[in-house]
Amino acid sequence: MKKLRLEVLLVEDNPADVRLIGDAFEEIHANHHLNVAADGEDALDFLFRRGAHINAPEIDLVLLDLNLPVMNGHSVLQEIRANPETALTPVVVLSSSNARKDVQKAYALHANGYIKKPRDLDGIFRAMDSLRTFWLELAELPS
């Protein structure tokens, strides 16, 4: 049975990207609540409900940038997969890097997908619409 509203955690340090991704989800009418963490440590605090995020909701999908301050996305992904409470949480890397080593490392750490951030507004809307269709409508999530 699908939840009425899914909780998405966007881990992104660029305010412009946060705004664009948020606008894209609003425009495509995704039935979700977009939570934002600006760095890797804050993302883990949110996911593990620590510190300021003690009352954070259970996350259904993580959209993870790789180039983050404090702790990079690969390290965040490794921590997510190492914890039994979050090991099955779907994580899609959303990065400006398409370097083979970054893509391969993300999949080696068990990312569920890897999307190179589109450079234009239409591309961002198409990417978020595809994510919405697959992850928020078609896929059965473990949460």
Image (cartoon, rainbow, N blue to C red):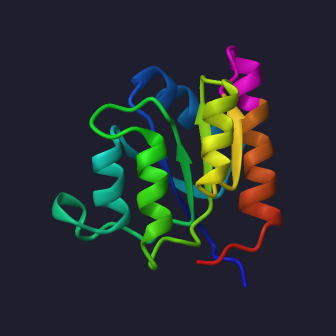
Question: Is residue 34 among what the camera can see?
Answer: no
Residue at 64% x, 52% y is: 108
| Rendered location of residue 139, percent (x, y) | 79, 67
Of 127 and 88, nearer the camera is 88
Left or right? Give the position of 127 relative to 143. Answer: right
- Residue 90's image quarter? bottom right
Left or right? Give the position of 11 relative to 98. Answer: left
Question: Is residue 132 among what the camera can see?
Answer: yes
Left or right? Give the position of 113 relative to 76. Answer: right
Q: Quadrant of the C terminus?
A: bottom right
Of 26 and 105, nearer the camera is 105
Of 48 and 131, nearer the camera is 48
| Rendered location of residue 109, percent (x, y) | 58, 54
Relative to 44, say whether 59 is above or below.
Answer: below
| Rendered location of residue 122, percent (x, y) | 76, 20
Residue at 29% x, 49% y is: 42
Q: Is residue 120 magenta?
A: yes
Q: Residue furthest left?
A: 51
Residue at 34% x, 38% y is: 38
Q: How many marks?
A: 0
Q: Is residue 22 magenta?
A: no
Q: Residue furthest top?
A: 120
Relative to 86, say whether 92 is above or below.
Answer: above
| Rendered location of residue 10, percent (x, y) | 49, 45
Left or right? Give the position of 105 relative to 120. Answer: left
Relative to 92, say whether 15 is above or below.
Answer: above
- Residue 117's image quarter? top right
Q: Quadrant of the N terminus?
A: bottom right
Residue at 40% x, 38% y is: 72
Q: Which residues are magenta?
A: 117-125
